[in-house]
Image: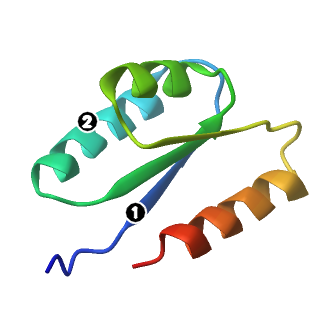
């Protein structure tokens, strides 16, 4: 049995820059160690596009502003759904 936690990464930019690249490196390395991970990112953003191409566990959501209750609700629902 895998005692490692599930991890939800969150990436909200539309573009691909340094933070997104670091997340990609982290995802790949943790994947090698058997860690179950998910990425919640902006719908049709670069993280979603590249992550789906690589076969990562991607959840997409619209993000309309810095304070977005629907985005926060999506975080909560994913955490409840994927809790181990």
Between 11 and 82, which is closer to the camera in this rendering?
Answer: 82
Is 64 positioned to the left or the right of 35 in the image?
right
Q: Report helix, strand or loop for mark 2.
A: helix
Residue neighbourhood size for the residue with mark 1, other residues' Cα within 10 Å, grouped as few (<14), some (14–19), many (≥20): some
Is 75 positioned to the left or the right of 10 in the image?
right
Q: Is there any visible trace of residue 18 in the rendered image?
A: no
The picture places residue 77, in percent across and down from the top left corner, at 68, 67
The picture places residue 33, in percent across and down from the top left corner, at 11, 56
The picture places residue 69, in percent across and down from the top left corner, at 88, 58
Q: Is residue 36 above or below residue 79?
A: above
Is 69 positioned to the left or the right of 3 in the image?
right
Residue neighbourhood size for the residue with mark 2, other residues' Cα within 10 Å, grouped as few (<14), some (14–19), many (≥20): few
Which label was assigned to residue 55?
none
Q: Circle 1 sits on which residue?
A: 7
Residue lying at 36% horizontally and 37% vertically, measured from the top left: 56
Q: Circle 2 sits on which residue?
A: 25
Foreground label between 1 and 2: 1
**On the rendered image, what quadrant is the C terminus found in?**
bottom left
Q: Is there any visible trace of residue 40 in the rendered image?
A: yes
Q: Report helix, strand or loop for mark 1.
A: strand
Residue lying at 48% horizontally and 21% vertically, measured from the top left: 17
- Residue 70: name its quadrant: bottom right
Residue lying at 77% horizontally and 60% vertically, measured from the top left: 72
Residue lying at 42% horizontally and 43% vertically, measured from the top left: 57
Is 75 positioned to the left or the right of 70 in the image?
left
């Amino acid at each position: 049995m895998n005692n490692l936690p599930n991890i939800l990464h969150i990436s909200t930019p539309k573009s691909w820059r340094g933070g997104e690249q670091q997340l990609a490196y982290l995802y790949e390395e943790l994947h090698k160690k058997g860690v179950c991970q998910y990425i919640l990112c902006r719908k049709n953003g670069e993280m979603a596009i590249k992550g789906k191409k690589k076969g990562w566990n991607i959840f997409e959501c619209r993000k309309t502003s810095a304070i977005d209750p629907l985005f926060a609700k999506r975080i909560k629902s994913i955490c409840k759904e994927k809790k181990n």
